[in-house]
Structure formats: structure tokens, C-alpha cells
Image (tube, rainbow, N blue to C red):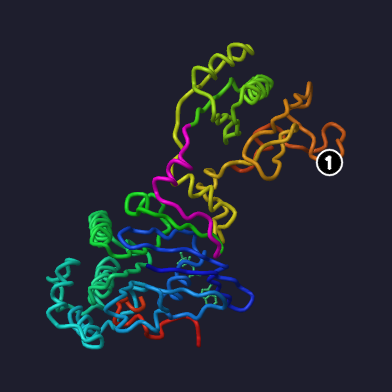
Amino acid sequence: MIEAVGLTKRYGAKTAVDDLSFQVRPGAVTGFLGPNGSGKSTTMRMVLGLDRPTAGHVTIGGHPYRSLPNAPRQVGALLDAKGVHGGRTARNHLLSLAQLAGIPAARVDEVLGVVGLQDVAKRRTSGFSLGMGQRLGIAAALLGDPQVLLFDEPVNGLDPEGIHWARNLMKSLAAEGRTVFVSSHLMSEMALTADHLIVIGRGRLLSDMSVTDFISANSADFARVRVPDDGPEDRQKLTSTLIEAGGRVMSEPGGALRVTGLPLPRISELAHKCDVRLWELSPHQASLEEAYMRLTQGLVDYRSTDDAKAGLAEPPPLDAYGHPVGGHAELPAEPLEVPQEGWYAPPPPGPRPTPGSGAPAHPAAAEPSAAAVEPSSAATAGEQTSKDPR
Ligand SMILES: Nc1ncnc2c1ncn2[C@@H]1O[C@H](COP(=O)(O)OP(=O)(O)OP(=O)(O)O)[C@@H](O)[C@H]1O
């Protein structure tokens, strides 16, 4: 088992990992998710003794990596598939790692077969594709037949067949009772591979639960409701009615409403009761990808200014004037004031301005924009390949 307690890493003013506590158990694949720069690699380097924590500690089987007897036989890791000596053949690269760790040469041919590189074993690694490099890194991690395995973005560069293979490999390693800790940006991939998820953002723990719990907690059914475009008052009236009936209502980009907590027939009934015509009433399920993006929203360091995925972000609620208010996902529970005039030019928050003061020209405009340790092996895990200049 890997156990982190209060794990913290600062680089000058930058806190890469912030008071992180978690356990990674044997017999399961644990996915380690977070946006770019959220601290996944730094955490893995600290697990492998390549970076020294600023505070807290992390152990494998109760010991810091550096105190483990014959660590390469106990822990295998793929951190950076590019960290291979390009002049060596794949086989020689693995042989040198095996020799350093006292692993018999026969194991090299075994792992080359496991990762499907037996036919290119005598080729220099400088000519390897990204996917071949990843496979070589995975072979290096498996070399010592370790009980604990860490893989940093192992499917990076793999083709669909390779991704499928890597997924099955992780699962079978876990089924053998090993501890498998895999980082990824891809929620969709982790949902298929992992049994347990640890999600971080800006170095902090956001979620630590089984995939099953994550699904039931995050992929709630919802209804999409749309009223005619020329009926903003109807939209408002329906929103108030649905909230009064116990529903949760959120604005979606494009003017639709996302309703949870009420079955479709009840929504239809309520719309009929308050005399609002519907253009759309359809059942949906929030995807895990969407749930993950919502979870990490606001903790993403690098995002394109026109990132289409920003559209998946749940928009904050709107106040009575159509402006976002902080904090909660629902529209305010109080019935909303429906301005009798000027709906298309709602006043900004604060003191009410005089009409025509430059507020958004349409309710939608008032909504938010959418709302290895050298291919790493156990054999090399103790080497100083870290960015941390100690
Ligand atoms: N040696 C270092 N010196 C200074 N800052 C660093 C160093 N290593 C990492 N960082 C910073 O720490 C933060 C976390 O980086 P890290 O590589 O751990 O994130 P990550 O989640 O693995 O990102 P990615 O998914 O992009 O690989 C980033 O802001 C990064 O710039």
C-alpha cells in the first residue's frame, strides 16, 4: 500500500502539492486524475523518493522508498518514457537496468514479450515512436516483477489497440493483488480502467472514492427543458414553478434549463399548470467527463481562451437580473422578479442604473460563457532524474 500523509511540495513560491493525504491499496487500479500542472508527477516523484517533500511524508508498505530493501524488486515505475539512452537497443536498455537490480537476463525477454516489443528488441530506441517508447517504459517498470506499480500517463502516445492493451494490463496486474497507481488527464479512460479515483486540483485533494461511488455521486439524471425563444417570461415563470415544486434548475448555454429532482411527467404537468409551452423536454445523463470537468473547474492552470470544453462548465446561478451569482449551482430558491420591461437589457448588480446603461442585450448575454524515473523502472527509480535540484 502507498500512503501519503500531509504531503506537501513547494518550489519557491509555487505550491505544487498541498497537504495531500491518501492511500493506494493493493488489488485495485487507482486512477490519479487532475488537470495539467495539478501536481500528479510531483506526487509520484515524492512516492519514489526522487523529490523530497517540503512537509508530510509518503510510504510504500510502511517505509519511505529510499529505505526499502531492494526497492527495484518491490516498486516499478514509468515516469518519463523519453528518458532512455537512444543509442541502445531496447533489449540492451532493459538488460542494463536488470543488471543494476540483480534481475536475471531471462526476465528481459519475458517483459519484452509482455509489452509486444519482442520483434524490435534489437532496434535502437532512438527510432522508437512515442507509443513504442511507452511500451518500453512499461517493460522497464515490470522488470523486477514488483508488487507496487506507478504509471504516469501510460497511455500517452498509444494507439487505440495500445490503449486497450494497457487498460487490460493494469487490470490484470491489480487482479494479481498488486498496487497499481496510474495518473491520467482522461476521466473517460480512467472510468474504464480504474476501480478507485483520487482527483487533485492545484495540488489539493478534490475527491477520493471508488469509481462506482463517483458515478453515482456525479452522473445524475437530468431533464433538458426549452421554452420558445420569444418567451423569456415563460422561462422565468417555469423556473419559479419548478423550484417551488422541489426541482433544481440551472441555466444551460443557449437558453435551455437543466432540471434535476423532478421526473419528466411531473415537469410536463407543472409546465401545463403554469401555462407554459415547451419546445423540448428530454432525458439526459451527465457524463463522468463532465462531472470531472465540473470538479476541476476553476483549478485549471492552462486553458485556451476559446476552449470549447469551457462550455461544459456548469454556469453559476443568475440573480433576478440575469447576472451570475457566486457559489451555488441552483437558481435562487426565491421566485425571481420578472422585469416587466427591459428584460433584454437587465441592469447590472448594485445600484439600479437608468435604462439603456449598457447591460447585456439578451438574457443569454448575461450568462457566463457557458456556463520514470527514466522509462522507468524499479531499477532506476532511485536515480536522480528529478527536476528537483537537490
Ligand atoms: N522542479 C520544479 N521547479 C519548479 N516548479 C515545478 C517543478 N516541478 C513541477 N513544478 C510545478 O509544480 C506544478 C505541478 O507540476 P506537475 O508536473 O507535478 O503537474 P502534473 O499534474 O503532473 O502536470 P501534467 O499533467 O501537465 O504532467 C506545476 O505548476 C509545475 O510547473
Q: Looking at the image, is 328 positioned above or below residue 260?
A: below
Residue type highlighted by circle 1? Gly
SS assignment at label 1:
loop
Identify the residue at horizontal 78%, vertical 24% (top origin). 339
Q: Quadrant of the N terminus?
A: bottom left
Q: Residues within 10 Å of mark 1 (few under 14, many from 20)?
A: few
Front position in the image: 306 or 301: 301
**Is residue 275 located in the magenta-colored stretch of the structure?**
no
365 vs 135, nearest the viewer = 135
Q: Position of residue 308 (x, y in %)?
A: 51, 47
Q: Position of residue 151 (x, y in %)?
A: 34, 67
Question: Which residue corresponds to mark 1?
Answer: 350
Residue in the image at 59% along x and 16% along y:
270
Number of marks in the image?
A: 1
Q: Is residue 196 left or right of residue 116?
A: right
**Residue 204 painted magenta:** yes
Vertical side of 113 occupied by 108: above or below? below
Q: Position of residue 241 (x, y in %)?
A: 65, 20
Q: Residue at x 49, y 31 (%)?
A: 222
Would residue 299 be visible to someone looking at this image? yes
Question: What is the magenta range?
Answer: 203-221
Q: Is residue 136 left or right of residue 35?
A: left
Q: Is residue 159 visible?
A: no
Q: Is residue 166 above or below residue 375?
A: above
Horizontal relation, residue 27 to residue 221: left or right: left
